[in-house]
Image (cartoon, coloured by chain):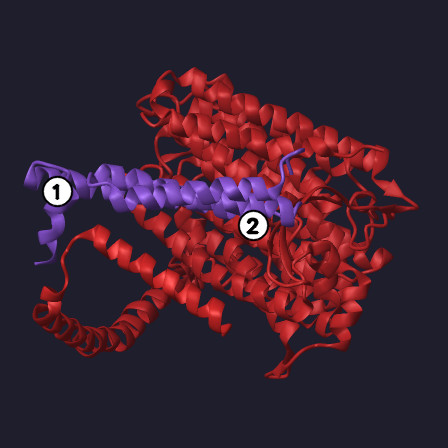
């Protein structure tokens, strides 16, 4: 039996690297040193995470047929009352171990990649410092054993995301994007905090293990707290927590920051806005899954399922029309996270009922690999042709052969073609959704087709679509950039069948169970067929330059135009904030504040001033005299107290 | 908990420290001297916090955390006070406390 005390090093090493690089920035002018410090710390953290995973899943995690949680560290931090306190601690359970592996793998790969991508940038050490800060916060978030600790690191990942999106701080669009991301997620976090406080008040604890224990769940079931609009207080708390998660995970309607976040450097998009931070919302729901499932008869989970399915569809439709390759990938990320949310929402609890949960986590795992790969490959392409736009690309297969193959694998994976990773996770999601509700399943099924189409639209337009001459022939010249891409490519091909059945590792009850992949069931054949149809259509339209795309766009008319303008959600938000909140509410308040509130304060101040003018001659101005008077006063009061015993 | 040292001993020490600081604050005429005396008083409180925490509630952290707050506060306060003293020195050419009695006007 092991005590897992080494896990503390997994977040601490990136923190050390952040402090070193951040505080002594100017001493790391030489690029390789800064990069190797970052890589070394993350590399060790990665190895430790793999070792933890090995220990947990294969050696000491299972006892009596069930994964048991380990709490290697646990300190009481703040005590509010006899029952309610905030701890600092680490919780090792199947979900957190899986997330450790995902976060460290992607972070490590991105650290290596950035050595090539950021080469020659003036803020090189700063970039590595921010990356390490992010890794530290994300890993601590994953390991947290209570909701408050999750909240603290939740904000810290928000800050590091803000810093990294605004990394090119001389670019106004990057500044605007970073502000937008921060404000939107902060807005959602406000609900998250309210939810946590409600949970603390009505369930009496912040501790995740206690919250998810059957005892607490029964207690909550018996004492649901006051009812508001037909829902109990704890249900409301869970809804609010889900809003927080939706903000971070870019679910509709809080998704508007994610596409703009693409202003950050591409490795950042791969790390934060594709693989790790944006799945924090999914992670949060998964963390509290028993609570979600048993409170209010799973009402919140239905919301999660509907929001997830709708976001998946919404984002996929927008992704069809975008021209900037990173934005296509951003919307695709949003769509895939919608998938994961949907999977959690449709999941049951015990045994095979828990397939949805398992599939959501599996998809999180595989999606992290292939989406990070797609972004890193996109980074190579952008680096090579110096543009984000598809119209500046085409025929790149000749110039970027390795990237071409890896991009192809990732695109096949995200489309759900066997034997690539995405197939295994996506089909389990569709299976679970089919059992739950036909409409939700059909949404997922349709989105699978759309996904295949827009991914291959991207693929064909970048690598084929006729010949093209470039002023500077693009080439893959950095081995630091190629290595992570190839490594993730191998994972994309193999992760699916290696880790099937994933329910041996992660399940809602923590009891491993096994299932068979039915390769030839109608559901699987159907979803593979729809993906192939999407690919086929993309091939027809984009393999060679044709006029089909513009004809199809015209055929869809308004719908195409709306999707291209992202359904005007941004404009709607601007309208609400600028025209309604600023003009109609904030301005009158500002007037009231300036004239009435300030007026009263000024009157009080002026009166005080006037009186002091009159009476200040009483005082000597010698400080030590005042001190003596003060002490006389204290002594006098003590004596009064002592003799008269008040 | 330190072996062989009772809490009374520590409290005696901090009380002494506090009153030395108080005496210094009341008798010094130099502003910097007064500031140093003030710091003595603050630090005696910080030690008190740690001592009470360790002897009365071992295993909890609040007292230690508060002494950390006190240290941070003291640093901030020193920075502010020194800035004021510097200005006083620029205005009057000395750091004598008697020089600043006109500040009330």
Identify which residue is drawn at 50% across, 21% down: A37
Residue furthest toward the front?
A643
Asked if badges 1 and 2 are on one and the same chain, I answer yes
Q: Which chain is purple?
A: B
Question: How many numbered discs, if any?
Answer: 2
Residue under mark 1: which chain is it in? B
The residue nearer to you, when weighing A71 against A297, is: A71
How packed mark 2 is, by other alpha carbons closer than 10 Å (few <14, some 14-19, many 20 or more), is some
The image position of residue A363, as x and y in percent, is 67, 47
For disc 1, the neighbor class at 10 Å (few under 14, some 14 to 19, many from 20) is: some
Q: Is residue A530 left or right of residue A603?
A: right
Residue A263 horizontal/vertical position (percent): 37, 42
Q: CA separation, marks 1 and 2?
A: 38 Å
> Which of A377 and A72 lies nearest the eye of the viewer?
A72
Look at chain A in the picture and name its colour: red
Q: Is residue A429 left or right of residue A601?
A: right
Q: Residue B76 in the image: state x and y as whole percent.
A: 32, 43
Q: Which mark is residue B88?
A: 1
Secondary element at tag 1 = helix
- Horizontal and vertical percent for residue A527? 70, 53
Counting residues from the start of the chain, the first of labels 1 and 2 encountered is 2
- Give the residue number, with chain letter if any, for mark 2: B62
Q: Residue at x 27, y 73 (%)?
A: A586
Specify whether residue A376 is in view: yes
Relative to A146, say whether A589 is above or below.
below
Q: In the rendering, which numbered label is found on residue A25?
A: none
Q: Quadrant of residue A500?
A: top right
Please say whether residue A540 is visible from this viewpoint: no
The vertical placement of A231 against A493, above or below, is: below
| A238 on left or right of A594 | right
């Amino acid at each position: 039996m092991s005590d897992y005390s080494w896990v503390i090093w997994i977040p601490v090493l990136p923190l050390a690297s952040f402090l070193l690089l951040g505080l002594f920035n100017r001493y790391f002018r030489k690029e390789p040193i800064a990069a190797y410090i970052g890589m070394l710390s993350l590399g060790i953290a990665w190895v430790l995470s793999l070792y933890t995973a090995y220990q947990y899943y294969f050696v000491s995690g299972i006892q009596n047929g069930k994964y048991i949680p380990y709490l290697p560290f646990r300190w009481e931090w703040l005590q509010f009352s006899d029952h309610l306190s905030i701890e600092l601690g680490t919780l090792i359970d199947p979900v957190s171990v899986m997330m450790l592996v995902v976060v460290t793998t992607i972070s490590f790969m991105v650290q290596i990649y950035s050595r090539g991508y950021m080469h020659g940038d003036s803020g090189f050490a700063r970039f590595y410092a921010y990356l390490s800060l992010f890794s530290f916060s994300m890993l601590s978030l994953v390991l947290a054993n209570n909701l408050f600790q999750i909240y603290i690191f939740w904000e810290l990942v928000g800050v590091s995301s803000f810093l990294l999106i605004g990394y090119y701080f001389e670019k106004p669009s990057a500044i605007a994007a970073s502000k937008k991301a921060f404000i939107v997620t902060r807005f959602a976090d406000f609900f998250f905090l309210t939810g946590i406080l409600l949970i603390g008040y009505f369930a009496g604890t912040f501790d995740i293990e206690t919250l998810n224990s059957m005892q607490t769940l029964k207690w909550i079931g018996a004492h649901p707290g006051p009812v508001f609009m037909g829902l109990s207080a704890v249900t409301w708390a869970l809804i609010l927590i889900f809003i927080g998660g939706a903000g971070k995970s870019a679910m509709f309607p809080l998704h508007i920051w994610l596409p703009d976040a693409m202003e950050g450097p591409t490795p950042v998009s791969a790390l934060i806005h594709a693989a790790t931070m944006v799945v924090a919302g999914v992670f949060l729901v998964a963390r509290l899954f028993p609570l979600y499932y048993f409170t209010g008869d799973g009402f919140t989970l239905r919301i999660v399922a509907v929001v997830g399915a709708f976001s998946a569809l919404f984002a996929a439709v927008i992704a069809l029309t975008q021209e900037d390759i990173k934005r296509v990938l951003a919307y695709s990320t949003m769509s895939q996270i919608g998938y994961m949310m949907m999977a959690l929402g449709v999941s049951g609890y015990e045994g095979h009922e828990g397939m949805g949960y398992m599939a959501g986590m599996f998809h999180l795992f595989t999606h992290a690999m292939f989406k990070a790969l797609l972004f890193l490959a996109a980074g190579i392409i952008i680096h090579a042709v110096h543009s984000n736009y598809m119209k500046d690309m085409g025929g790149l297969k000749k110039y970027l052969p390795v990237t071409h193959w890896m991009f192809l694998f990732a695109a096949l994976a995200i489309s759900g073609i066997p034997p690539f990773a995405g197939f295994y996770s996506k089909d389990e999601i569709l299976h679970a959704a089919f059992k739950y509700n036909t409409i939700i399943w059909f949404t997922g099924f349709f989105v699978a087709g759309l996904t295949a189409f827009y991914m291959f639209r991207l693929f064909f337009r970048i690598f084929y679509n006729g010949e093209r001459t470039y002023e500077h022939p693009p080439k893959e010249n950095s081995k630091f950039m190629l290595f992570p891409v190839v490594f993730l490519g191998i994972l994309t091909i193999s992760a699916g069948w290696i880790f099937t059945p994933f329910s041996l590792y992660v399940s809602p009850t923590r009891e491993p169970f096994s299932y068979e992949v039915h390769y030839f069931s109608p559901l699987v054949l159907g979803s593979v067929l729809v993906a192939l149809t999407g690919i086929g259509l993309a091939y027809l339209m984009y393999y060679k330059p044709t006029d089909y795309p513009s004809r199809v766009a015209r055929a869809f008319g308004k719908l195409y135009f709306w999707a291209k303008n992202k359904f005007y959600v941004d404009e709607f938000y601007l309208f609400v904030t600028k025209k309604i909140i600023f003009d109609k509410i904030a301005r009158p308040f500002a007037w009231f504040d300036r004239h009435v509130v300030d007026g009263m304060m000024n009157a009080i101040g002026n009166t005080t001033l006037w009186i002091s003018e009159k009476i200040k001659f009483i005082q000597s101005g010698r400080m030590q005299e005042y001190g003596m008077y003060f002490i006389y006063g204290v002594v006098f009061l003590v004596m009064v107290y002592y003799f008269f015993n008040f | 908990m330190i072996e062989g040292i009772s809490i009374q001993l520590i409290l005696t020490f901090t009380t002494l420290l506090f009153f030395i600081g108080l005496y210094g604050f009341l008798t010094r005429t130099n502003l910097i001297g007064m500031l140093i005396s003030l710091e003595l008083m603050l630090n005696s409180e910080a030690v008190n916090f740690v001592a009470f925490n360790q002897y009365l509630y071992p295993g909890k952290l609040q007292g230690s955390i508060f002494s950390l707050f006190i240290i941070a506060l003291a640093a901030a306060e020193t920075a502010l006070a020194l800035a004021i003293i510097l200005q006083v020195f620029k205005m009057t050419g000395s750091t004598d406390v008697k020089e600043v009695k006109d500040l009330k006007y």
